[in-house]
Image: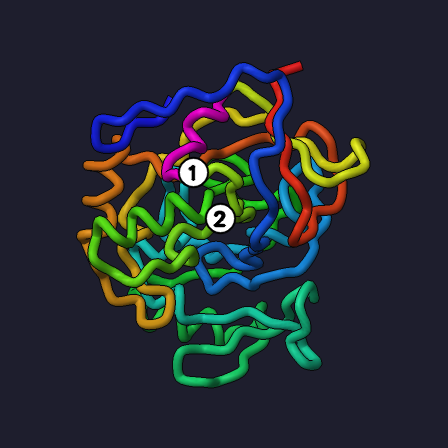
Amino acid sequence: MGRHDGATFVFMAQEAVVIGHVEAIFRYPVKSMAGERLEAAELGWHGIEGDRRMAFRRIDDRSGFPWLTATKLPDMLLFAPHGCADGAQGEVPTHVRTPDGAELPIFGEELAAEVGRRYGPPVQMMQLRHGIFDDASISVIAEDTVREIGRLAGVREDVRRFRPNVVVRLLRSGPFQEDEWLGRVLSFGEDGDGPLISVTMHDVRCSMVNLDPDSASPAPEVLKAVVHANQNNAGIYGVVTRTGRLAVGQSIVLHARG
């Protein structure tokens, strides 16, 4: 169950009910760099195809998580991966546009040097077949949750702060309804054989949500709002239990597990 300002939302008892529609789909080809908004995407066993398949490794780091993220270098958000020819949606990225406007090959020494110059220690671009994720390979958040956090924080609402894969337009308005989905299954599409996501955990937020996607400037009141309103949770993580195609406008049905 979710909690917000003392109000408790209890989900209706039906085993399957339409809760909303897909409002937006995002993928992030390079971990912590700018994402891209898609009209449709293939959802595989390891998340959206092409999502977080590359990341910069901190060469001198010997920890279990050597990846460079925007929590350590906020400027990462200002680097934009895109395709070689015209940057069309869905292309595998070959180049990155730097904050200064330079177009650099994604695996080139120049890009690694530019990121390393901003960060300090040296870095190296790595590609992993199954992706580089913090907690799970797919994340979902509702528009109402983003809107409420923006209101409480006194900042312009911007779903990009939360770096979700799927944004939901709810039929029943109200923030933090995602908490009600834990232990249940989300299905997508009208034909009954679309992708399935088993909802496994809250998306516990970190200081990434404070960073403006267009300037990388911090607004600490955003994370404070999430902490105070919903115990630091905003959105959910899940695991893919059936692959398929996601598309903007698809209906989303919430099912009892199994």
> Secondary structure beneath disc 2?
loop
The residue most toward the bottom is 101
Quadrant of the image containing the N terminus: top left
191 lies left or right of 200:
right
- Residue 223, horizontal then vertical, whole percent: 24, 46
Residue 235: assigned label: 1
Q: How many marks?
A: 2
Front one among 26 and 129: 26
At label 2, which amino acid type do we have? Pro
Any part of residue 59 in sight: no
At label 1, which amino acid type do we have? Gly
- Whether pointer 1 and pointer 2 mark residues with C-beta atoms closer than 8 Å, the reply is yes
Identity of the residue drawn at 26% across and 53% down: 151
Q: Is residue 177 magenta?
A: yes
- Residue 28, horizontal then vertical, whole percent: 54, 57
- Residue 199, horizontal then vertical, whole percent: 54, 27
Q: Is residue 1 above or below residue 207?
A: above
- Residue 213, horizontal then vertical, whole percent: 37, 65
Quadrant of the image containing the C terminus: top right
Q: Is residue 166 above or below residue 255?
A: below
Identify the image quadrant of residue 99.
bottom left
Q: Which residue is tagged 2?
A: 164
Identity of the residue drawn at 50% across and 19% down: 12
Identity of the residue drawn at 45% across and 32% down: 178
